[in-house]
Image (cartoon, rainbow, N blue to C red):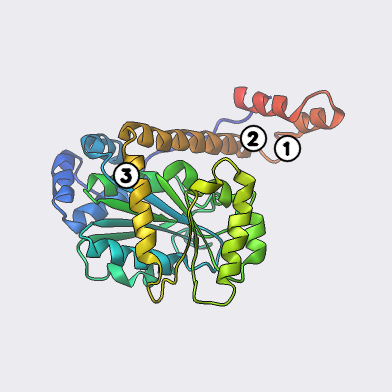
């Protein structure tokens, strides 16, 4: 099968002086917020400056612990992230936050519903929050999130909190990106907990029942503990915590648990943790290239292969390989 070749993508022009990349990185590392924002913008756009910036950031990467927060809609992720920020700041740690919001169907940009609830970040130079559009990625992240993690890590933040868009059980890309994965639920989301058994629960390092002051919180905790029995070999290692982000209940315990797991995580080679994120980027880019190639061939490009699959003369796997090889 042959398909039309799409034109190579062209990086958008840089909005910064390419002759001053080193100076920009230096200003970013000194804490200049405008420089941090400029670097993030270039990396998010994947402009012609992005490769230069990423190369200049390399000596400064591997310091930050990346903590991902995910879970079904209505679990109170943003409010809990806000409470965690406040707790971390009281201990003197600097915090970078990536809030992955739904994309606008018109502009493609982020709808900033989550960011406005992060009041702990207001007027605090030790916190930097960036909203990022999901851009339709069903895994809850877009590849730009990984590049922004590098920017915040390179800027010297101690911890990077990554809040995914909240679309449900498909939201598992965070497992490839975060060093610690926190899955959040809340009372009254029973159906979602059942769905989570085959998705989000498989990636959790910490399970949290938020809105723990509401009726049914204990029952929800027991449901999660029961669901963990599916993972018999690790069930006793996954903490199940109860929080109430609005009044601060349980937040200190959550941060202590993050620190305990984080200590074990950071004992690992920083390069191996970053390599995992690079593998995610490669896999995502490969998937995007295949999708682009198929679209470039038109709506009927796969019809011969589809007919072969229908007739039984070719398996779907063989058809997929044919697409990759064409």
Quadrant housing residue 303: top right
Q: Can the viewer see residue 305?
A: yes
Distance Cα–Cα, label 2 vs label 3: 50 Å
Q: Which residue is mark 1?
A: 300
Check disc 3 and report its element: helix, strand or loop.
Answer: helix
Q: Residue at x 23, y 57 (%)?
A: 93
Q: Nearer the viewer, residue 141 or 289?
A: 141
Q: Residues within 10 Å of mark 3 (few under 14, many from 20)?
A: few
Q: Position of residue 267 (x, y in %)?
A: 31, 37
Q: Position of residue 256 (x, y in %)?
A: 34, 57
Q: Are marks 2 and 1 in contact (CB under 8 Å)?
A: yes
Residue sticking out furthest to the front: 236
Check disc 2 and report its element: helix, strand or loop.
Answer: loop
Quadrant holding the C terminus: top right
Q: Which residue is mark 3?
A: 263
Residue sticking out furthest to the right: 311
Q: Nearer the viewer, residue 154 or 14?
A: 154
* Foreground label between 1 and 3: 3
Q: Residues within 10 Å of mark 2 (few under 14, many from 20)?
A: some
Distance Cα–Cα, label 2 vs label 1: 7 Å
Check disc 1 and report its element: helix, strand or loop.
Answer: loop
Q: Nearer the viewer, residue 174 or 102?
A: 174
Q: Residue at x 74, y 30 (%)?
A: 316
Q: Position of residue 288 (x, y in %)?
A: 53, 39
Residue 273, above or below 166? above
* Foreground label between 2 and 3: 3
Quadrant housing residue 295: top right
How many numbered marks does the figure carry? 3
Residue 254, above or below 269? below
Quadrant holding the N terminus: top right
């Amino acid at each position: 099968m042959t398909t039309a070749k799409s034109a190579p993508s062209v990086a958008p022009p840089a909005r910064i002086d390419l002759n001053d990349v080193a100076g920009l990185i230096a200003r970013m590392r000194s804490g200049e917020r405008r420089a941090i924002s400029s670097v993030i913008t270039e990396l998010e756009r994947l402009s012609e400056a992005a490769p230069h910036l990423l190369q200049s950031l390399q000596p400064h990467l591997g310091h930050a612990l990346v903590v991902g927060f995910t879970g079904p809609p209505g679990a109170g992720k943003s409010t809990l992230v806000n409470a965690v920020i406040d707790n971390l700041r009281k201990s003197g740690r600097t915090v970078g936050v990536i809030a992955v919001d739904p994309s606008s169907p018109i502009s493609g940009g982020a709808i900033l519903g989550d960011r406005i609830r992060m009041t702990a970040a207001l007027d605090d130079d030790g916190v930097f929050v960036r909203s990022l559009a999901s851009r339709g990625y069903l895994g809850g992240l877009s590849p730009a999130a990984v590049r922004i993690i590098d920017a915040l890590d390179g800027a010297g933040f101690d911890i990077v909190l990554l809040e995914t868009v909240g679309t449900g059980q498909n939201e598992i890309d965070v497992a490839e990106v975060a060093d610690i994965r926190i899955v959040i639920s809340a009372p009254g989301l029973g159906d979602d907990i059942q769905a989570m058994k085959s998705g989000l629960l498989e990636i959790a390092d910490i399970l949290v029942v938020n809105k723990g002051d509401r009726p049914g919180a204990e029952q929800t905790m027991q449901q999660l503990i029961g669901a963990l029995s599916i993972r018999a070999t690790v069930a006793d290692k996954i903490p199940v915590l109860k929080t109430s982000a609005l009044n601060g209940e349980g937040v200190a315990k959550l941060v202590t648990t993050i620190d305990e797991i984080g200590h074990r995580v950071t004992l690992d080679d920083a390069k191996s943790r970053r390599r995992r994120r690079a593998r995610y980027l490669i896999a995502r880019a490969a998937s995007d290239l295949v999708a682009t190639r198929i679209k470039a061939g038109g709506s009927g490009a796969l019809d011969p292969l589809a007919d072969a699959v229908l007739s039984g003369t070719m398996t779907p796997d063989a058809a997929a390989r044919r697409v990759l090889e064409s």
